[in-house]
Image: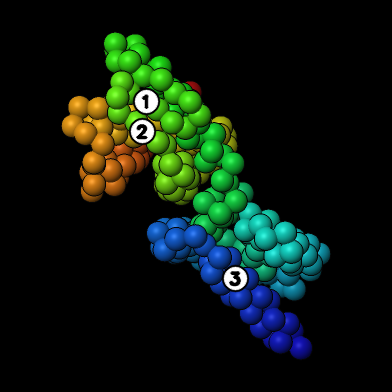
C-alpha cells in the first residue's frame, strides 16, 4: 500500500513537471530550465525519501498546483510543484531554502507569467537610453517604448523585454550563491539585486543597439543576438566576481 502511494506521488511529480514544461513559450527556456534541474539534483545529492512524507504539505502542494492549472499560471503551478517535491524528498547536503530557489527558477515561468515586468523593462530601458544619448549630445526622443535618435526610429519590441536575460541571470546567480555563500545571509540579500542586474544588462543592450543603428544603419541582423549574448556573458562574469568578493569578506568576518 505504501509502495503504491509512493508511485502515485512520483507520477504526480513527473506529470506535473511535464505539464509546466509543455506550456513554455520557447525551446530556449526549456533547455535552460532542464540544465538547471540537472544542477539542482546534483547539488542536493544525496537525496532521501521522507517516510511517510509530509502529507499535509503534499495536499497543499497538489491543491496549489491545480489552482495554477485553473488560473493558467505557471508561477502558481511551479509553487505547488516545489512544495510537493520537498514534502517527498529531502536533501542530505544542503539547506532546503536555497535549493528551493534554484528549483523554483528551474521552471520556465518567468517568460510566461512575468510579461508585465518585461513591459517595465522595455519602458524603463527606452527612457534611460534616450536620456543617456542626450547627455552625449545626440538628439533622442522617447515615447513609450519607441526611441527616435535624430532620423533613426528604434522600437523596443517584446523580444527586447529582457525576460530571458532575467531567467538566465536568476539561475546563474543562484547557482553561484549556492556554491559561494551556502550558509551566509548574504544569499537572500543578493536575490533582489538580480532584477536590477537584469535591468541594467537589458538597458545596456538597448543602448549599444541604438548606437549601432544610429552610426551604421538600422539593419543589424545577427549582430543583435550576438551583442545580447556578449552582454549576458559580461554580466555573468561581473556577478561571479561580486559574489566571490562577498564570500571572502564573509569568511574573514567569521574568523574575526
Among numbered discs 3 and 1, the one appearing first in the sequence: 3
**Left or right: 248, with 10 as reference point:** left
Q: Residues within 10 Å of mark 1 (few under 14, many from 20)?
A: some
Up-down relation of residue 214 to residue 20 (above or below): above
Residue at position x 54%, y 50% in the image? 110
Disc 1 target residue: 148
Report the number of numbered marks.
3
Q: Residue at x 29, y 34 (%)?
A: 209
- Distance between the Cα atoms at labels 2 and 1? 6 Å
Q: Quadrant of the N terminus?
A: bottom right
Q: Nearer the viewer, residue 132 or 11?
A: 132
Taking 127 as reference, is 11 above or below it?
below
Tell me the tag on residue 19.
3
Pointer 2 with pointer 1, Cβ within 8 A:
yes
Residue at the image position 36 percent from the left and 19 percent from the top: 140
Helix, strand or loop at disc 3? helix
Question: Badge 2 is on which residue?
Answer: 154
Compare marks 2 and 1 and give the one earlier in the sequence. Answer: 1
> Few, some or many C-alpha atoms within 10 Å of disc 3 (few <14, some 14-19, many ≥20)?
some
Amino acid at each position: 500500500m505504501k509502495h503504491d502511494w509512493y508511485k502515485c506521488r512520483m507520477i504526480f511529480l513527473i506529470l506535473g513537471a511535464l505539464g509546466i514544461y509543455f506550456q513554455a513559450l520557447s525551446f530556449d527556456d526549456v533547455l535552460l530550465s532542464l540544465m538547471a534541474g540537472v544542477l539542482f539534483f546534483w547539488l542536493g545529492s544525496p537525496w532521501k525519501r521522507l517516510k511517510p512524507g509530509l502529507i499535509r504539505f503534499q495536499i497543499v502542494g497538489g491543491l496549489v498546483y491545480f489552482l495554477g492549472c485553473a488560473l493558467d499560471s505557471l508561477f502558481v503551478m511551479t509553487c505547488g510543484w516545489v512544495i510537493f517535491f520537498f514534502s517527498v524528498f529531502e536533501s542530505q547536503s544542503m539547506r532546503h531554502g536555497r535549493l528551493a530557489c534554484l528549483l523554483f527558477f528551474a521552471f520556465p515561468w518567468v517568460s510566461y507569467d512575468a510579461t508585465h515586468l518585461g513591459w517595465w523593462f522595455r519602458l524603463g530601458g527606452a527612457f534611460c537610453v534616450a536620456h543617456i544619448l542626450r547627455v552625449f549630445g545626440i538628439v533622442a526622443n522617447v515615447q513609450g517604448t519607441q526611441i527616435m535618435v535624430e532620423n533613426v526610429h528604434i522600437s523596443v519590441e517584446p523580444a527586447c523585454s529582457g525576460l530571458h536575460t532575467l531567467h538566465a541571470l536568476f539561475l546563474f546567480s543562484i547557482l553561484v550563491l549556492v556554491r559561494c555563500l551556502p550558509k551566509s545571509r548574504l544569499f537572500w540579500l543578493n536575490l533582489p539585486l538580480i532584477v536590477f542586474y537584469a535591468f541594467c544588462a537589458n538597458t545596456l543592450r538597448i543602448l549599444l543597439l541604438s548606437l549601432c543603428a544610429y552610426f551604421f544603419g538600422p539593419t543589424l541582423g545577427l549582430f543583435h543576438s550576438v551583442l545580447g549574448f556578449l552582454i549576458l556573458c559580461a554580466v555573468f562574469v561581473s556577478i561571479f566576481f561580486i559574489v566571490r568578493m562577498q564570500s571572502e569578506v564573509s569568511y574573514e568576518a567569521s574568523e574575526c
